Image (cartoon, rainbow, N blue to C red):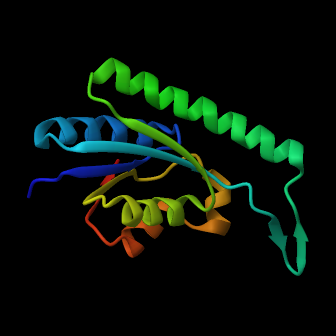
Amino acid sequence: MPYSKILVGYDGSEQSVRALRSAIELASTFKAMLEVVHAYNAAPVIIGEAVAASPPAGAESMRLEAETVAAEARTIIASATDMPIEVMITDGDPGKRVVGLAKERGADLIVVGSHGKGGFKELFTGSVSHYVTQHAPVPVLVVK
């Protein structure tokens, strides 16, 4: 099945680097358009009934870290291919943003790493790759 538009969820983890490299190969094979998205979540933290908003300095720090992660993706892309690839940064729940962008941008394949930088946080929020595989409107390739 040929793909024409591939969306990659990227967070800078080892698995997402592998996912990005796999997606670059697929895009090259199928002559597909490739888009990369890094989503960071600056949403308020909810603990029980208490809601703690992210402080402005914390949100800005997350945005700057997101810029660094996106720059790393651009470096990997530049070393692997000369095809034009868009790297997007977005705020919001990473799983929901990947699925939403796949719908909005007409992707026909999503590529994600098997697990990312979430670590201990994933115990509370769930795995991004699991969310994407359960809610994506198109096939999902999960790279280990």
Q: Residue furthest left?
A: 1
* Residue shown at 81% from the left, 65% from the top: 45
Q: Which residue: 30% across, 58% down?
A: 107
Depicted 119 relative to depicted 23: above or below: below
Closest to the observer: 100 or 24?
100
Percent across and percent down for residue 20 are 35, 39
Q: Is residue 50 left or right of residue 128?
A: right
Q: Position of residue 51 (x, y in %)?
A: 88, 71
Q: Quadrant of the N terminus?
A: bottom left
Task: Give the residue drawn at x 31%, y 61%.
Answer: 106
- Pick out the residue farthest to the top: 79
Q: Is 73 located above or below residue 104 in the figure?
A: above
Residue 135 drawn above or below residue 69: below
Answer with left or right where residue 111 lies relative to residue 125: left
Question: Number of labelled discs?
Answer: 0
Whole-percent x, y for residue 99 in the image: 43, 65
- Image location of residue 109, percent across then percent down: 26, 57
Q: Residue at 53% of width from left, 27% of height from top?
A: 71
